[in-house]
Image (cartoon, helix red, strand yellow):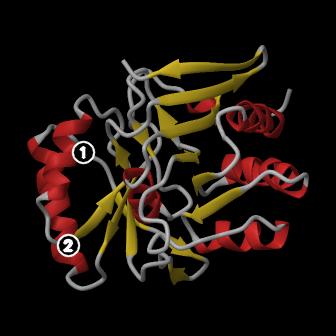
Amino acid sequence: MDAREMKVKAAQAALAYVEDGMRLGIGTGSTADEFVRLLAEKVHGGFKVEGVPTSERTARLCVELGIPLKSLEELPELDLTIDGADEVDAKLTLIKGGGGALLREKIVAAASARMIVIADESKLVDMLGAYPLPIEINPFGQTATQIAIEKAASRLGLTGELKLRKSGAEVFTTDGGHYIFDASFGRIPDAEALSAELNFIPGVVEHGLFIHMASLAIIAGEAGARTLEAK
């Protein structure tokens, strides 16, 4: 089973948690894309959902496949969000934002009664941090914000490069018009402490640490899909 097949398996298992008539947050990324494709098949068969996409990319795919969409203004309270992750640990703490949609993903997840994460087994880790942590920043004061992030990380014993994300030769810009630093801190022993430090920095719009947000993870591997509950 290759990586794409595992993502499809996780997405298939997640569909069992989607009920007819749900207000559904729809995530962003390669695994979420597989979920969207499978959801579209059910919608075409008469299944009713109203989806709130977490990115313009996801919105375009949903429109292309015929999934009905609403804005979060129209549906400010959601029943369920299904989204992928770049890393997930045993406590279901996540690193997200590899696709650049972390701000909207976190807003949508927070507006949901429940969040389910879907991923292949390569995303399951003992400790977060091998995947660079995306930190979304305001373009104004970029250098000052970078220095503040480096000082905050240092207080926690974390070091590593902060790399401004690029798209080709240009700086990558999020759907909200912000920039992203990808922070290669390595292992992050205390995600909650790092989250608190980053939240104190005015130039940081949001970061990719999702803490106490996911209630269930569906992890697909060679043997099929299995579920993990938050501890």
Q: CA distance from mark 2 to mark 1?
A: 19 Å
Asked which secondary structure carries label 2, the reply is loop
Q: Are marks 2 and 1 in contact (CB under 8 Å)?
A: no
Give the camera-side residue of 128 and 40: 40
The reply to whether residue 203 is in sight is yes
Q: Which mark is residue 203?
A: 2
Residue located at (84% from left, 49% from top): 42
- Mark 1 burial class by Cα count in 10 Å: few <14, some 14-19, many 20+: some
Q: Is residue 38 left or right of residue 177?
A: right
- The part of the image, by quadrant, that contains residue 185 is top left
Q: Which residue is mark 1?
A: 159
Residue 121 visible somewhere in the drawing? no
Q: Nearer the viewer, residue 83 or 189?
A: 83
Residue 91 drawn at (x, y percent)? 38, 24
Query: Residue at horizontal 61%, vertical 74%?
Result: 56
**Depth order, front residue of 156/200:** 200
Viewport quadrant of the C terminus: top left
Q: In the picture shown, does residue 190 fall above or below 26?
A: above
Question: The N terminus appears in which quarter of the rendering?
Answer: top right
Helix or strand or loop: what does disc 1 sit on?
Answer: loop
Q: Residue at x 59, y 20 (%)?
A: 227
What is the three-letter code of the residue carrying label 1?
Thr
Residue 87, horizontal then vertical, whole percent: 49, 37
In the image, taking residue 36 as reference, residue 2 lies left or right, namely right
Pointer 2 local density, CA inside 10 Å: few below 14, some 14–19, many at least 20 = many
What is the three-letter code of the residue carrying label 2? Answer: Gly
